Image: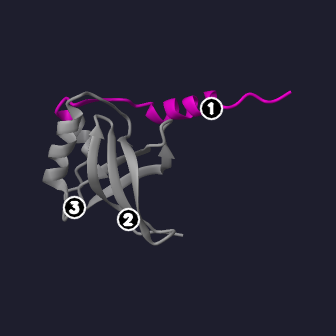
Amino acid sequence: MEYPETLAQVIRVLRKDTVLIRCVCPHIQSQVSMYMTPAELWCEEEAVKGIIDWVECHADADRLKLITWDWMRDEYGRLLADLQDVQTGEMLTDYLVSVGAAKPRPHHYLDVIHTIAAAREPDEC
């Protein structure tokens, strides 16, 4: 089953790597709020200002395209995602790297999978 592209609205930037977003959930036909972290980035302290600046410039009627990889979440429950300008196609993560507010983290997804696998409860005897 195909769903229309997911549009998100940025509610608040909480920390250098945590953004509160609201988007439409097609399964329940309602809006949900969730925390996201920019995927594949190591964010610096300047990332807070960078995220706010980018959202102010690129949000079209407060809407941005939400780009996810299978709705994967990190060890803190934050959605690993990126935001894209609906009209120009510019990505938040590309902007943060270009202004020096973040560094690439190419193995972010593998790190998350490793952390989750290592946190399993031991088998009972």
- Residue, disc 2: 5
Q: Are marks 1 and 3 in contact (CB under 8 Å)?
A: no
| Residue at (47% x, 37% y) in the render | 76
Figure check: 121 above or below 61: above
Q: Nearer the viewer, mark 2 or mark 1?
A: 1
- Residue, disc 1: 117
- Label 2 environment density (alpha carbons within 10 Å; few <14, some 14–19, many ≥20): few
- Label 1 environment density (alpha carbons within 10 Å; few <14, some 14–19, many ≥20): few
The image shows residue 20 at horizontal and vertical percentages of 33, 49
Q: Describe the element under mark 3 as helix, strand or loop.
A: loop
Tell me how many marks there are. Answer: 3
Question: Gap between marks 2 and 1, in whole Å?
Answer: 31 Å
Residue range corresponding to the magenta coloring: 98-125
Q: Nearer the viewer, mark 3 or mark 2?
A: 3
Q: Describe the element under mark 2 as helix, strand or loop.
A: loop
| Residue at (19% x, 57% y) in the render | 59
Q: Which mark is residue 62?
A: 3
Residue type, numbered disc 2: Glu
Residue type, numbered disc 1: Ala
| Residue at (37% x, 41% y) in the render | 37
For marks 2 and 1, the one nearer the N-term is 2
Residue type, numbered disc 3: Asp
Q: Nearer the viewer, residue 93 or 30?
A: 30
